[in-house]
Image (cartoon, grey):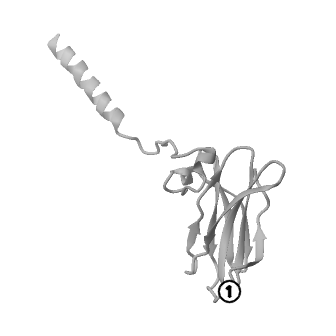
Amino acid sequence: MFKIASRVAAVSAATVVLGLIPLAGTSYAAGCYGTSCDNKGPKSTGCEGDAVGHGTVNNNGRVAELRWSDKCRAAWVRTTQKATPSWYSSYATIEKYDKSGKLVRSLSVDTPDTYNSSDWSNMLGGNDYSYRACVGFKKDSGAPYGVQCTNKWG
């Protein structure tokens, strides 16, 4: 009887210990949801894990991709430099629209200066919104020009 009891105890202890070790492919809860993701990074919150693209625009080698995380209910723009950088600067923007089509908020990120490198904006989140990604250039004065955008999604 003692051997059976000690084996049961050993199996129970092993089950408890193994239950504390995350298995490969285990999904973790995101660090935000919906509007609580506003202005937070997709990587630091874990939202990039299930992200998918919903439109890309290429503006003279500056690429903007609309990214969406379903588990976080948030969007952001990933921008990639696909052309030899030039003397003028470029940027990408994520835009959030309400049901009436009114722009609610936008966040921007500069396009990287290094060829074939990427960066991303912080997120904008929430249900019942649509989103689009844009990429454009800045004049010396800082004024935008040559802006191109994806279709709205959501």
**Which residue: 66% across, 78% down?**
90
Q: Quadrant of residue 64?
A: bottom right
Query: How many numbered markers are drawn?
Result: 1
Q: Position of residue 86 (x, y in %)?
A: 64, 88
Q: Is residue 128 left or right of residue 25?
A: right
Nearer to us in this view, 2 or 154: 154
Reading the image, the residue beneath label 1 is: 140
Residue 65 location, quadrant: bottom right
Q: Nearer the viewer, residue 40 or 46?
A: 40
* Residue 6 appears left or right of 22: left
Horizontal and vertical percent for residue 146? 77, 78
Circle 1: residue type: Asp
Q: Give percent across and percent down for residue 21.
A: 34, 39
- Tell me what residue is drawn at x 64 percent, y 78 percent: 82
Q: Residue at x 67, y 46 (%)?
A: 126
**Considering only vertical position in the picture, is 147 above or below 123?**
below
Task: Report the residue that reaches farthest toward the front.
Answer: 141
Q: Residues within 10 Å of mark 1 (few under 14, many from 20)?
A: few
Work out which residue is located at the far top of the displayed protein and give it. 1
Circle 1 sits in a helix, a strand or a loop, which is it? loop
Horizontal relation, residue 131 to residue 50: left or right: right
